[in-house]
Image (spheres, helix red, strand yellow):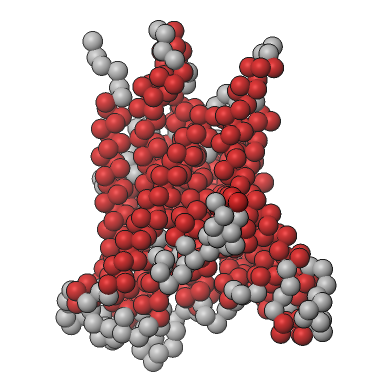
């Protein structure tokens, strides 16, 4: 039995890495919850409730929300969108995983890589693309010669649902592709050798392995769809959603906090089940996307028959067209004059005027976003590394605070992170060196870092688990200290996973929109906010698309560079052959 001193030494690092998460994530969230009970609502809302604006009751924000019919409509519409997104996202992403990770056929690896195309689409970029494709007089309707009378072919709600299917189906694809790559083919072969039908193979060999990751993906999609902002905000202006209602309530501390609490509780409702199924199925979580960047399966696939190959190839071409169409449409939209491409299928003329006439503030906002994203990604990688190392041998009670905080960040909507940070650190605080963080770039970096931390923690911990302890024991046996072993043995081996995680955090942070809308100030505007402003201004839509193209290109270059460095690091970390 280990001595108490050894237990405390093992627990100390875990408690230490949990401290920044508690101070800058858990504490702000508790302050926001307190505001929902103690902060008053705006005077006109108090008048509606027949309260004295200066003597409002306890939990005024919550009481008003519960009595507000708009709140209930927003809650119902958000919940409905989340449930339907689960159905369509799982069907789409799961279908792609079965199409590209079950049988080998010509071009399979290329199509499997395209399955991760949505990761290049920041939320607002995807919204811009889907509006141009499916909105009023969108390109698809012009190709099909439909909607020429100006009548929308799809309702705004369906436009949002299609966008969510495209964006969040990625999670189902990543989860199930990882599970299929790890599947033992001998189980399927055994069932077939015993005369089992295809249904029997699915029921006895595939379903037990796919059930847990499928459930985890569905629950993660539910949380992500409920927290979505850009799609509902720009594609369905006739409806009301909780995330949009929170942003509209800016300036009313009590009511906004109450709405944010409701949004958090909606997301949290799926978190326990998500964690259960994730642990049960040993899914890779979001970090599975990193594996997908390599475009290679972990096992050899059985070859499809010639007829099946043709069918799979045809379906793959159709799926790839849908996955790549938004990216190409954004690029094309940046090369046309505003309002000049609203009737013809193909624009009459292309030019680079949108890039040449880009306002200086747009370039400045892009530089700011790159800077904010770089700092946030660096913080996430360092925290993830510290958490992974500290929790590796920590007792359960000491690991719980950090693990709980990371799970909290996973479930929190971006709206909630932004509102919580404003509640705690808008005014000067000793935790911020006596400075208020409101209207500063620091609060944006902090929001990005806290929101995307799980994207780095999961791959870091998975890499350490896969590493095992044999090499470390060998190094310690040769006299190396713990620090030297970590620097010269552990870090080189897990560096590829850390790099992929950092790049994913960087790309996500650069394109973050909802927290940016709440936290930005005129002198700290990120590129996503500037893009949204240009999109809503007549005559500047091509400039918004041009910024979107730059973000897509930067994301693609970052991921490509990460892949090259990963391969180089992985090769250099291999033991030399004798």
The spot of residue 523 in percent (x, y) is: 40, 69
Left or right of 357? Residue 138 is right
Q: Is residue 304 visible?
A: no
Give left or right: position of 127 versus 307: right
Single out the residue that lies furthest toward the front. 434
Determine which quarter of the picture holds residue 477: top left
- Residue at 67 percent across and 60 percent down: it is 32
Quadrant of the frame with the C terminus: top left
Q: Is residue 259 left or right of residue 492?
A: right
In front: 534, or 98?
A: 534
Q: Where residue 73 appears, x then y in whole percent?
A: 67, 76
Can see residue 444? yes
Which residue is painted at 40% across and 19% down in the image?
Answer: 484
Q: Nearer the viewer, residue 429 or 576?
A: 429
Residue drawn at (46%, 44%) of the image:
380
* Location of residue 547 (image quadrant): bottom left
x, y percentage for residue 193?
46, 28
- Tag count in the figure? 0
* For residue 127, above or below residue 569: below
314 is higher (above) or lower (below) than 98 = below
Which residue reaches farthest top?
A: 478
Location of the N terminus (image quadrant): top right
Vertical position of residue 570 compared to residue 440: above or below: above
Residue 108: x percent and y percent? 30, 45
State the residue at coordinates (47%, 62%). Answer: 440
């Amino acid at each position: 039995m280990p001595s108490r001193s050894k237990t405390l030494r093992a627990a100390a690092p875990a408690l230490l890495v949990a401290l920044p998460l508690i101070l800058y994530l858990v504490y702000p969230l508790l302050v926001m919850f307190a505001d929902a009970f103690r902060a008053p609502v705006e005077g006109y809302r108090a008048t509606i409730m027949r309260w004295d604006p200066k003597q409002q009751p306890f939990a005024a924000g919550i009481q008003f929300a519960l009595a507000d019919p708009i709140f209930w409509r927003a809650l119902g519409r958000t919940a409905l969108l989340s449930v339907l997104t689960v159905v369509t996202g799982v069907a789409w992403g799961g279908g792609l995983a079965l199409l590209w990770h079950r049988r080998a056929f010509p071009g399979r690896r290329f199509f499997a890589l395209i399955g991760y195309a949505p990761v290049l689409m920041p939320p607002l970029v995807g919204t811009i693309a889907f509006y141009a494709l499916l909105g009023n007089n969108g390109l698809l309707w012009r190709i099909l010669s439909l909607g020429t009378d100006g009548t929308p072919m799809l309702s705004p709600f369906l436009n949002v649902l299609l966008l969510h299917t495209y964006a969040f189906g990625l999670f189902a694809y990543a989860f199930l592709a990882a599970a299929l790559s790890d599947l033992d083919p001998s189980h399927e072969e055994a069932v077939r050798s015993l005369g089992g039908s295809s249904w029997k193979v699915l029921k006895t060999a595939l379903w037990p392995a796919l059930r847990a990751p499928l459930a985890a993906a569905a629950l993660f999609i539910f949380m992500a769809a409920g927290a979505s902002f850009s799609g509902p905000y720009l594609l369905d202006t006739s409806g009301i959603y909780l995330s949009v209602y929170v942003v509209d309530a800016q300036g009313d501390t009590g009511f906004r906090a109450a709405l944010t609490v409701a949004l958090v509780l909606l997301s949290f409702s799926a978190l326990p089940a998500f964690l259960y199924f994730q642990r049960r199925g040993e899914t890779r979580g979001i970090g599975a996307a990193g594996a997908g960047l390599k475009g290679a399966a972990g096992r050899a696939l059985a070859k499809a028959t010639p007829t099946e190959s043709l069918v799979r190839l045809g379906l793959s071409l159709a799926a790839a067209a849908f996955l790549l169409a938004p990216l190409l449409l954004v690029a094309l939209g940046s090369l046309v004059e505003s309002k000049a491409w609203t009737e013809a299928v193909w624009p009459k003329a292309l030019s680079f005027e949108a890039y040449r006439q880009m306002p200086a503030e747009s370039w400045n906002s892009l530089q700011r976003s790159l800077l904010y994203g770089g700092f946030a990604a660096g913080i996430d990688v360092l925290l993830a590394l510290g958490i992974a190392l500290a929790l590796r041998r920590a007792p359960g009670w000491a690991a719980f605070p950090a693990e709980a905080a990371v799970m909290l960040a996973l479930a929190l909507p971006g709206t909630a992170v932004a509102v919580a940070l404003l509640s705690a650190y808008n005014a000067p605080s000793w935790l911020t060196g006596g400075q208020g963080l409101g209207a500063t770039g620091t609060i944006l970096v902090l929001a990005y870092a806290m929101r995307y931390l799980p994207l780095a923690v999961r791959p870091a911990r998975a890499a350490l688990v896969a590493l095992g302890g044999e090499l470390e024991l060998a190094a310690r046996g040769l006299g190396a200290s713990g620090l030297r072993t970590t620097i010269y043995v552990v870090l080189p081996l897990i560096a590829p996973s850390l790099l992929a995680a950092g790049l994913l955090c960087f790309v996500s942070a650069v394109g973050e929109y909802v927290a940016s809308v709440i936290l930005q100030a005129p002198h700290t505007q990120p590129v996503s906010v500037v893009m949204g402003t240009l999109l809503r201004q007549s005559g500047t839509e091509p400039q918004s698309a041009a910024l979107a193209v730059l973000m897509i290109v930067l994301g693609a270059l970052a991921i490509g560079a990460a892949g090259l460095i990963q391969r180089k690091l992985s090769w250099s970390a291999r033991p030399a052959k004798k």
